[in-house]
Amino acid sequence: MCGIVGYLGKGNAKSIVLEGLKRLEYRGYDSAGLSLLDEKQNQFNIYKEKGRIAQLEKIIDLNDARVAIGHTRWATHGRVTKENAHPHQSNNGRFIVVHNGVIDNYKSLMKTYLPDTVFHSETDTEVIVNLIELFAVKKTPANAILEVLKLLEGSYALLVIDINTPETIYAAKHKSPLLLGKSDKGIVIGSDMMALVNTADNYLALDDETFLRITPKNFTLYNLEGEVLPYTMSLLDLDDFSSEKGEFEHFMLKEIHEQPAVLRRIISKYYNDTDIHIDKILLEKIKAHDSIHILAAGTSMHAGLIAKDLLESLANIPTQVHIASEFAYQQPLLKGKPYFILISQSGETADLRACLVNLKKEKYQTLTVTNVRTSTLAREADDYMEIYAGPEIAVASTKAYTAQIAVLATLAYALSDQSFDLKRELSEIAQAMEHFLDKKDQYKDLVAATLTKRNCFYIGRGLDYYVCLEAALKLKEISYIQTEGFAAGELKHGTIALIEEDTPVIAIISNRKTADNTRSNLNEVKSRGAKTLTITTESLKETDDQIVLDDVNPSLSPLLTVIPTQLIAYYAALIRGHDIDKPRNLAKSVTVE
Ligand code: M6R
C-alpha cells in the first residue's frame, strides 16, 4: 500500500528509483510519480501518471539523474487522479514531498496555518509540503520539517527535497515503514526492503519519530527534537527465494508451487534430528501464561484459526483468535495471564500495529510470527518467529498461509509433551503437495465448468471449515466471484435459501469424524440444483469426488487441502483475464487502518 523510493549517489537515480518502485508494485497502487534532478537546468522535474509505472516511464524525458524520489499511491485522500498522485510540490515550488500514511488532523492544520493557501489536490500530503514551506521562511529546512512533524497526527513515511540544496534528501518516519540502504555508490531509502534490493549492502530500519538528513555519501539520524541518534546498520541478507517470476506466468502460481520447498525450509530451520530450534526462554515464557490470544488480519487470521486448533489440541493452551482491526478498538475482557501472538506475513499491517501499541502500553508479552524479520511488528514485539516463506509478491497470499501454519504447528508441538514425529508429518505433506501440483493442469477445465455463476460457496466442518474461509477469501479477491466460506452444518439455518440452479458449492472433506455429515449437507444443496465439487482425501473419497489428495495427519490437513483452493482461485482469475498478481483495489501491505 503506497510505496516510496528515493536515491542519491553515483548510480543512475532514475532507473534505481523506477526499479525500486517496480519492486514495490506488489504492495498495490493506483498511480505513480517521480521527481528527478535535471542538472543541466538545475531544477527538479516532476512526472506523475494514473495507473501503472509503465505509463509513468513513458512520459519521463530525462535519461539520467543523481537525485530522485518516487512514489506509488494507493488512494486514501481523494480519488485516483494525476493531481492527487505524488510527488507534491509546495506552492512557491521550493519543496517537493512524497508521503505514505494518513495525516488525521490535516484539515485542522489547513484551517489553522494555511487558511489562504490554494490546494491543487485533495490529499493530506499537500498540507505537509505547504506547511514546510511556511515554516522554512524563518527556519532552516531541517528545523522547518521538524516543526511540521511535531504537528502531524497519524502516520507518515516522508521524503522531502528542498530545491535550494538539491543534493540532500530529508526523510522522516512515524508508524509507516521506512528503511535506508547504503552502498559505496550511494544511499537509497524506501518503504520496503524490496526497494533496497540490488542497490544497498547494508540497511537501517528506522524507528518511529525519527528524522534523517541524507547526502550522497552519508546521513545523520535525529529524533524529533533534532538530537543526533546513534544507529547500527545491518547486513542486507537477501533471501534464497528469488523475487523474479522465472518460468511461471504469475507470481501467484510460482508461490503456490514454492510451498513444498517452503515447508522443507521450515523443517531445516526449526528441526534437527532430535530437537526443535525454538528458544527455550521463549517457550518457558509462553508456558507461564494461561491463555493465548492470536491477532491477525485476512489470510493470516485464517492461519491463526488453524493455529488455535493446534495450540489447544497439542499444547492444551486455551486460545482465541481475533480480527486485529476489531481488537484494536474493542479489546475483550482479558482475564488471568494472557499471551499474545501476532501473525502477519508483511509485519507491517497497521491494524496489528495499533493492537501492538496498546498491548505494549498494558505490558502484555507479545510474539510476532512473520515473513519479514526486519518488519515493524517483528522489531516491536517482545519476540518474533520467522516463517521463511521468501518474498511473497502476489497480493493473494498463498505460501505465507501454509508457512504460518507450519511454524505455529511447530510452536504448538514444542509447547506440548507430545512425541509424534511432526518433522516427518510435515515432509510427507510437502510430498503430497507436490503430488497434487504435478496434476494441476487437469483442473483448469473443471474450474471453468464449475464456476459459471457470480457467486460460490465453500463448505466444510472443523478445520475444513477454517480452510473454507481462506478458500473463499482467495477466490473472491482475485476472481471477484462473490464467495462465502460456510460451516457446512450452518447452511440449513438460512444460507441454503441462496442455492439455485447451478450455484457452485465446493466441499472440503478431510476429517473422518465429520465427513458423512458434510456429505449430507452437500447432498442437500445438490438436490436444490447446486453444481458441486468435492476436495477430499484418498481414505475418504467416494466415486464422483473430483479432487482427491493424499492422506496426511488430519490435524495438519489444512496445509494440503488449501492447495487446490488456491489453484481454483488462480484458474478462475486466469479464465476471466484478471490481473492475478495485482487484483483491483487491493494492496499487499496494508499500512493504513
Ligand atoms: O501482511 P499480513 O499478513 O498482516 O496481511 C494481512 C492481510 O492483509 C492479508 O492476508 C490479505 O488478506 C491477503 N491479501 C489475502 O490474500
Image (cartoon, helix red, strand yellow):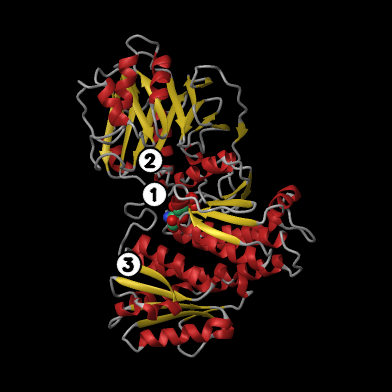
Residue 554: x, y in percent? 61, 75
**Residue at mark 1:** 587
Q: Pick the residue in front: 180 or 340.
A: 340
Q: Residue at x 62, y 27 (%)?
A: 232
Disc 3 marks which amino acid?
Answer: Gln
**Residue at mark 3:** 482
Q: Residues within 10 Å of mark 3 (few under 14, many from 20)?
A: some
Mark 2 element type: loop
Q: Residue furthest right?
A: 274
Q: Residues within 10 Å of mark 1 (few under 14, many from 20)?
A: many
Disc 1 marks which amino acid?
Answer: Ala
Does label 1 point to a residue whose CB lies under 8 Å from ligand 1? yes
Q: Residue furthest top?
A: 138
Q: Residue at x 78, y 61 (%)?
A: 273
Q: Give whichever of discs 2 and 1 has the lower sequence position.
A: 2
* Quadrant housing residue 581: bottom left
Q: Is residue 168 above or below residue 467?
A: above
